[in-house]
Image (spheres, rainbow, N blue to C red):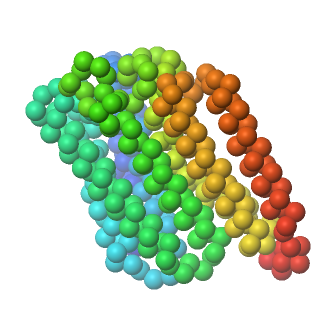
Amino acid sequence: MTSLMRLHRPLMVFTAAMAVLAVVAAVGIVADPRVLTGMPIWAKPFKFAVSFVLYATTLAWMLSLLPRRSRAAEWAATVVVAASVAEMVVIVGQVLRGRTSHFNQTTPFDAALWSVMSIAVIVLVSGHFVVGLVLLRARIADRVAAHAVRWGLGLSLLGMLVAVPMTLPSAAPPGQDAIAGAHSVGVADGGAGLPLLGWSTTGGDLRIGHFVGLHALQALPLVAMLLGRRFDGLTRRRLLAVAGGAYGSLTLLLTWQALRGQPLLQPDALTVTVAGALAAGTVLATGTVLRLRRPELELAA
């Protein structure tokens, strides 16, 4: 933790602040009886705070892998922190006002706050992209970790991009000009949903693919850790490529399912078929990689 604080203090200070907010929001979920769009009003700050704790900590760790400090990456990460703070200020502020933060254009003030959030997201994605470029070009000593980081950053960017349909004019509920988008497809936001997550159980929900894609940032490095030193470096990198391809395909599959207005837990035959093909392809690719591994390199590793 000391080295992370020394490398990028803003990310780690932000992580600590979000950890505190997560605790406050958790208390709010229990203590505050207010409900907004079908969920406890403090559920959204809680989910965002936990997600930012994971994101900021992982980003700080990734920066620590650089062979030398990069001003571009550190400035970009600071920009990410600033944009994230702006987003969280709006989310918490709207909770205190008892109003929705996302897609809300009910009043000029609400519309202005939604515009701030939209700009903050664009800035955050831009900063994330710059960090990704720096890490992509860097000569990281641990090549397996480097591949895991690059896959994680790239797929988390995909996770950010699959959220774009939520904000398109076509996503807004018919006849509700004050609402600039929606999480759900085929049903109104705020209906029946999974506990805490709130993902719709009656229609499609674009938050699912968004969530899965974002957390590739943690999932791919975790895969690299689980692989350990069991195989040679080339085999581990190939297995990471298989995992990355499967993870990205799953993100797109979940987004496609949502865009068709289909609940996560009620897939139709087509979705099940595609998911089955993805699973079979992943198993086949994994088996192929393992058959191609070179035992002599594995022993040397």
Residue 52 in the image: x percent, y percent? 41, 49
Answer with the quarter of the image where residue 140 lies: bottom right
The image shows residue 187, relative to residue 217, as above or below, that is above
- Tell me if residue 28 can be seen: no
Q: Considering the image in quadrants, where does the C terminus appear?
A: bottom right
The image shows residue 170, relative to residue 202, as above or below, that is below
Specify whether 3 is left or right of 180.
right
The image shows residue 223, relative to residue 69, as above or below, that is above
Specify whether 266 is left or right of 170.
right
Residue 279 in the image: x percent, y percent? 73, 42
Specify whether 281 is left or right of 66.
right
- Tell me if residue 278 can be seen: yes
Specify whether 154 is left or right of 48.
right
The residue at the point 47 percent across, 42 percent down is: 210
The residue at the point 61 percent across, 47 percent down is: 249
The residue at the point 42 percent across, 37 percent down is: 47
Give 63 or 184, whichever is nearer the viewer: 184
Answer with the quarter of the image where residue 271 lies: top right
Give 110 or 262, whichever is nearer the viewer: 262
The residue at the point 11 percent across, 34 percent down is: 109
Give 208 or 99, whichever is nearer the viewer: 208
Residue 207 in the image: x percent, y percent? 45, 35
Residue 68 in the image: x percent, y percent? 45, 83
